[in-house]
């Protein structure tokens, strides 16, 4: 009786293809970001049934209505964040820990906030040996004020609005990047905190995973 084993995909080749066909062709131009995403094994941050699809140009389902963001969206956000090695980063929407792992290759430290207990558990297992990343379980929209102020705020997904609670956890002149939902369309945006206020400007229309907890308050009209 002959038994056959299912052949595992060549993940190194898939990472190389992701860089060539998804990142470099979509303005992910920071060489450090590209190198980190070419190194971190994305297949380790998805459930077993999603492993074959870990590098596709689409959302990877994580369960519970949550998804791993598109490589292109994450790559564009990290590029626009203008990261430097000394940065302290607050990451909102840690999910299974993939983006935190990429950031750990690029910055001094990462505080990654996640609200889904199952994803928190997955991220903590995947990142157990990385002292640069701290996984915090709690509402995404509240961030982690205990670790503030941060140099950079990264929202790795799309939200209806960025609450003041998160903005105030960033240094004055700190950088903020994330996805915004505008009339049903997800757009990547970037901004800075300043003494005169805070605003974000769109820089790309890209499909992006949507994060829970950021719905705008309902407005009554008469």
Image: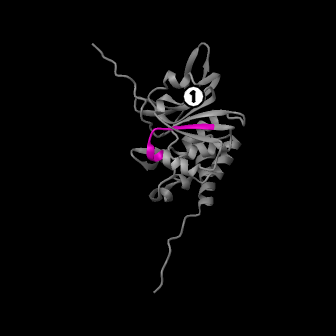
Percent of width and height locating residue 202: 54, 28
Residue at image position (68%, 33%) is 87
Region in magenta: 110-119
Indicate the quadrant containing the C terminus: top left, top right, bottom left or bottom right. Answer: top left
Residue at image position (68%, 48%) is 35
- Tag 1: Cα neighbours inside 10 Å, few (<14), some, or many (≥20)? few
Asked which colour scheme the image uses, the reply is one colour
The residue identified by callout 1 is: 146
Relative to residue 14, is residue 137 drawn left or right? left
Question: Which quadrant of the structure image shows residue 14?
Answer: bottom right
Indicate the quadrant containing the N terminus: top left, top right, bottom left or bottom right. Answer: bottom left
The outermost residue toward the right is 85
Instruction: Looking at the picture, tell me which residue is in the foreground, 88 or 83.
Output: 88
Magenta stretch encompasses residue 113: yes
Percent of width and height locating residue 52: 50, 59
Instruction: Looking at the picture, tell me which residue is in the foreground, 137 or 4.
Output: 137
72 relative to 92, above or below: below
Residue at image position (66%, 37%) is 109
Count of numbered labels shown in the rendering:
1
The outermost residue toward the left is 222
Percent of width and height locating residue 34: 66, 46
Percent of width and height locating residue 22: 58, 48
The outermost residue toward the front is 146
Question: Which quadrant of the structure image shows residue 196?
Answer: top right
Q: Secondary structure at mark 1?
A: helix
Magenta stretch encompasses residue 90: no
């Amino acid at each position: 009786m002959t038994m056959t084993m299912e052949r595992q995909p060549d993940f190194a080749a898939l990472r190389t293809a992701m860089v060539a066909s998804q990142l470099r062709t979509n303005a992910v131009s920071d060489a450090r970001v590209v190198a980190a995403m070419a190194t971190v094994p994305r297949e380790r941050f998805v459930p077993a049934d999603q492993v074959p699809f870990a590098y596709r140009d689409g959302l990877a389902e994580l369960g519970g209505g949550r998804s791993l963001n598109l490589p292109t969206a994450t790559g564009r956000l990290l590029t626009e964040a203008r990261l430097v090695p000394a940065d302290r980063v607050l990451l909102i929407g840690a999910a299974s820990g993939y983006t935190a792992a990429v950031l750990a290759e690029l910055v001094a430290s990462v505080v990654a906030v996640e609200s889904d207990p199952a994803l928190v558990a997955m991220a903590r297992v995947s990142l157990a040996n990385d002292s640069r990343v701290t996984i915090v379980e709690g509402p995404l929209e509240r961030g982690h004020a205990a670790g503030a102020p941060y140099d950079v705020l990264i929202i790795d997904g799309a939200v209806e609005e960025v609450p003041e609670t998160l903005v105030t956890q960033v240094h004055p002149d700190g950088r903020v990047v994330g996805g915004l939902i505008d009339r049903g369309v997800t757009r990547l945006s970037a901004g800075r905190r300043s003494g005169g206020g805070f605003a974000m400007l769109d820089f790309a229309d890209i499909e992006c995973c949507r994060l829970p907890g950021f719905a705008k308050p309902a407005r009554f009209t008469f």
